[in-house]
Image (cartoon, rainbow, N blue to C red):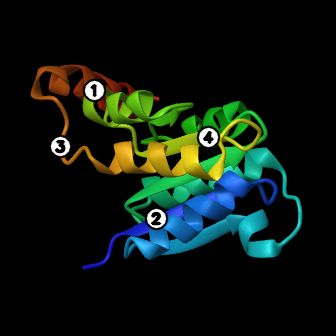
Amino acid sequence: MKKRIAVGSDDRYAAALEAARYLAEKGFEVVEVGSLKSGKPEPWPEVGFEVGRMVAEGRVDWGVAVCYTGTGVSIAANKVRGVRAALCFDAQTARGARLWNDANVLAMSGRLATPEVAREIIDAWLSVESIDESERLNIERLKKADASI
């Protein structure tokens, strides 16, 4: 079955457009959110919330959220119970976020991530098929904290 990925952005940044295009090219079903869907600027909190909700509710397998710095959408997505959004500026950080933190939302900066860097970050994110077992207890701690909030 084809994996579903929510890709959202508060504006039509090259990194967001490339993320949606590249993931579709790789065979994922891309669900566009925010500016990618509407074609006009959208509030970054709403983009982060929507991507986060889609992930938390299981409507998509994971999400990508982009705003000018990437910080706003990552904060907003992390407000959704069950979301572990990671702001990644490079491939190694993205790989580590999946491997050691089981991140389920990738946040990127529309200002800093060129299309090429966005592809590198996505490739690193996709390269992790399962978490580092030595981090399982820490990830379970996060999930337990989510359940108590």
- Examine the rendering and report whether any part of residue 31 can be seen: yes
Local SS, label 2 = strand
**Circle 4 Cα neighbour tier, 10 Å, few/some/many (<14 / 14–19 / ≥20):** many
Give the residue type at disc 2.
Answer: Ile
- Residue 38 vs 85, above or below: the answer is below
| Sequence order check, earlier mark of 2 and 4 | 2
Which corner quadrant of the image does residue 62 belong to? bottom left
Marks 4 and 1, how far apart at CA: 18 Å
Locate the N terminus by quadrant.
bottom left
Local SS, label 1 = helix
Identify the residue under disc 3.
Answer: 130
Give the residue type at disc 1.
Answer: Trp
Identify the residue under disc 4.
Answer: 108
Give the residue type at disc 4.
Answer: Met
Give the residue type at disc 3.
Answer: Ser
**Circle 3 Cα neighbour tier, 10 Å, few/some/many (<14 / 14–19 / ≥20):** few
The residue closer to the viewer here, 96 or 78, is 96
| Sequence order check, earlier mark of 1 and 2 | 2
Local SS, label 4 = strand
